[in-house]
Amino acid sequence: MDSRNPLVFNGEISSPKKKEKLEQSEEYFSKWSELPDEITETIIDRLGFPDILRFGSVCMPWRSVSLETLRRRSLSSRPYNPMVLFEYNLEKGTFGFFSFEESRVYWLNIEGSPAAQCIGCSKGWLVMLSPNHTYCFLLNPFTGIRIDLPYLNKPKVDDFSKVILISNPLDISSKTMNFHCTVVALNLSTELNICSLGELYWTVMKVDDHGQIIYSPIFHKGEVYSLAGIDELWILNLAAPKPESHKCKVSFPEEDIVNGHEYYIDCYLVASEDNLLMVLRLKTKTPIKTVKFMIYKLVENHHKGNDSKAAEYIWERELFLADDQALFVGNYVSISVSTTECRGLQGNSIYFTDDKLPKSSGPDHEYPETGIYKVESGDIVPYLPFNLYPFDMPHIWITPSI
């Protein structure tokens, strides 16, 4: 994950002036490469994702151990620390990541995958729009692996507002394409486009016959959940021979209904272990600024009885998150993580970012609104230790994967 051009770097280490130094370093590292696997496994199991990649670049034996560790971690429930993609030059293939675990920036250069726009992120993979806007593809920025998705002429793929992967696009054991991976893309807020890797066409469906507007789709407990307002939830079953959807009425506490004339409200669905959370983000209108978050948990309505018109579920207010829980919310990705397993994060907090491209480039240029909302105190603090200038692209949460 070196920020230098790899060709220049290779030229440096192969220059005649450094030949003697290179030979000495090879002799030095050859001793380290002879360490027993059980020792290197003990060391590498304590490292974060970037360090594991660096560890594997030292020598072939260490690379073998690092790949096996990445494979084993990917198959387990132990996640890698979320990072934030804060800058990306899609023409040059340059990506800038900030690691919360290490509080440092990593730059990656990926050649051969130019794109017009990033339109989604899921399972550690970016969903990229092709330069001619005719199809999209999956790109793993940490490995450089690319997987093309089917062409889609109408509607255009740049109308996608969110894309989710039901599973990892690669089979971790065989390192081959996972043809059981299903891709679900929300288009124009009314249609879901569905395909499995390797298929030539998308299946396009509306959740109902009237083009119901939905948003914030998320995969939870084997189904896709989408909002159609805070009092309506659509559930899509992908396991059926043909994808089927049904609507659920959800009761929302009347005392919590906020004044729509006073705030803009964004909604995010977040899967948190066995629970489905709805996070409301309240923003003042002039100027547009995030001031508060409200958290709700989806619970069954046990008082429904025989009333067929009663709500099936209730959004139950959650005043706090757990001390070891953090939420990451955004249009592309919304996730819940344990701060015990993921170091460098603040518990009982919500990490948020802006999903929109900047509107201007003059003196009133807007940068993405980002921050950490501390649920208990209501305070908002920055999550980046540096000024955003000149990085003005919408930030994307990403959990590294292979």
Image: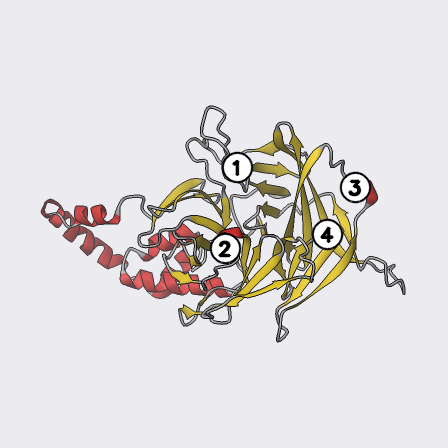
Q: Residue tagged by mark 3?
A: 256
Which numbered disc flags the more N-terminal residue, 3 or 2? 2
Q: Where does residue 176 sit, x and y in percent of width and height? A: 40, 70
Q: Where does residue 55 sit, x and y in percent of width and height? A: 34, 54
Query: Tag 2's secondary structure?
Result: loop
Q: Residue tagged by mark 1?
A: 383
| Labels 2 and 1 touching (C-beta < 8 A) | no
Q: Which of 123 and 224 is in front in this view?
A: 224
Q: Can residue 64 be seen in this view?
A: yes
Q: How crowded is mark 4: few (under 14 residues within 10 Å), some or many (20 or more)?
A: some
Which numbered disc flags the more N-terminal residue, 2 or 1? 2
Query: Tag 4's secondary structure?
Result: strand
Q: Where does residue 335 sit, x and y in percent of width and height? A: 58, 52
Gap in angstroms between the C-alphas marked 3 and 2: 38 Å
The C terminus, quarter of image: bottom left
Task: Indicate whether 233 appears above or below 346.
Answer: below
Q: Which residue is drawn at 65% across and 52% down?
A: 269
Q: Nearer the viewer, residue 207 or 308?
A: 207
Query: Tag 1's secondary structure?
Result: loop
Kindly report which numbered mark, 2 or 1, lies closer to the viewer in this rendering: 2
Disc 4 residue type? Lys
Q: Which mark is residue 156?
A: 2
Disc 3 residue type? Asp
Q: Residue tagged by mark 4?
A: 297
Horizontal relation, residue 58 to residue 176: left or right: left
Q: Which residue is drawn at 33% across and 57% down?
A: 56
Which numbered disc flags the more N-terminal residue, 4 or 3? 3
Task: Indicate whether 286 appears above or below 114.
Answer: above
Gap in angstroms between the C-alphas marked 1 and 3: 28 Å
Q: Which colour scheme is used?
A: secondary structure
